[in-house]
Amino acid sequence: MSGNQQGGNRHDKALTYISYLKIDELLELQQPESDGPEHDEMLFIVIHQTYELWFKQLLHEAAALQSALEAGDTHRSLALLGRIRTIMKTCVAQIDILETMTPLQFNSFRGFLQSSSGFQSAQFREFEAVLGRRDPAGADADKSSGMGMAEHLIYGSPARSRVEAAMSRPALWDSALRYLASRGHAVPNDLLYRDVKIGYQADERVQSMLIEVHRNDADAAAVCERLVDLDEGLQEWRYRHVKMVERTIGRKSGTGGSAGVDYLASTLFRPVFADLWAIRSKF
């Protein structure tokens, strides 16, 4: 049997838009829990399922970005950073849709959510870890604080394992430092070979090096500025998210017993790439 005949047997039916994208299966995934069901629960489900798809894509792009940075590929790194920033803008824009739902409309089905909570989004927790977040108290941080990345995920579950694995790998900033070192910039060796399970702390040596990058290496400086774009985009997402939650439930605890607005507000204005922000006042 020829190779073409063998290949043809794998597709007895013509591939269509519906079969390729699994549309029928996709449209079966919206299953409201409320009685009726309540009209606005469908919007809530669709928006959050869409977020999870975007989080999956962000993880996909971030992995490619780290590979490109470590390979010293400036062009591809810039393209990937641009795409990540555009996806994040889309995620922020979707909050506008959620905010068309009033507090009364949300409360009409909120009780049916039981213990489910956005804190259980393993993909967003994993994305935070890829960007460099590490929990000082580890994955079993005090649940009441709302600060742990993995404590809302079932111990030993695949989702929790992915978050913990991401906290054990080099973060995006580690890859950026390797990119800069590959271009001959003076990145301290103790940072290039640091324990990546520990959160990175801003370093004045790196800041001095970054100032020289901006003055003498236009391509690397462009990559650094796109990293700032990404960081700013994440902060924009956090701000819009906290205001949306406050607008919807006020200062009440979140579903699943999370700290709600108070925790979300505590995450604001925490830069991912602190060195890149610190140098703004040093030029």
Image: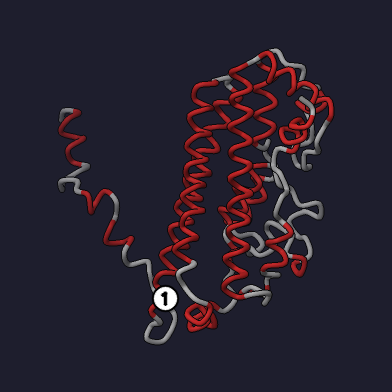
Q: Position of residue 235 (x, y in %)?
A: 64, 49
What residue is drawn where x is 71% and y is 47%? Answer: 133
Viewer-closest of 11 and 57: 57
Q: Position of residue 54 (x, y in %)?
A: 47, 50
Viewer-closest of 138 and 275: 275
Q: Position of residue 265 (x, y in %)?
A: 70, 61
Residue 120 picture quarter:
bottom right
Q: Is residue 106 left or right of residue 221?
A: left
Residue of label 1: 40
Q: Position of residue 111 (x, y in %)?
A: 54, 83
What residue is drawn where x is 68% and y is 35%? Answer: 170
Task: From this view, report whether residue 32 is shown above or below residue 163.
Answer: below
Query: How many numbered circles does the render carry?
Result: 1
Q: Is residue 111 left or right of residue 214?
A: left
- Quadrant location of the N terminus in the rendered image: top left
Give the residue type at disc 1. Answer: Asp
* Disc 1 residue crowd, few under 14, some 14–19, many 20+, Cα 10 Å: some
Task: From this view, report whether residue 278 is shown above or below residue 40.
Answer: above
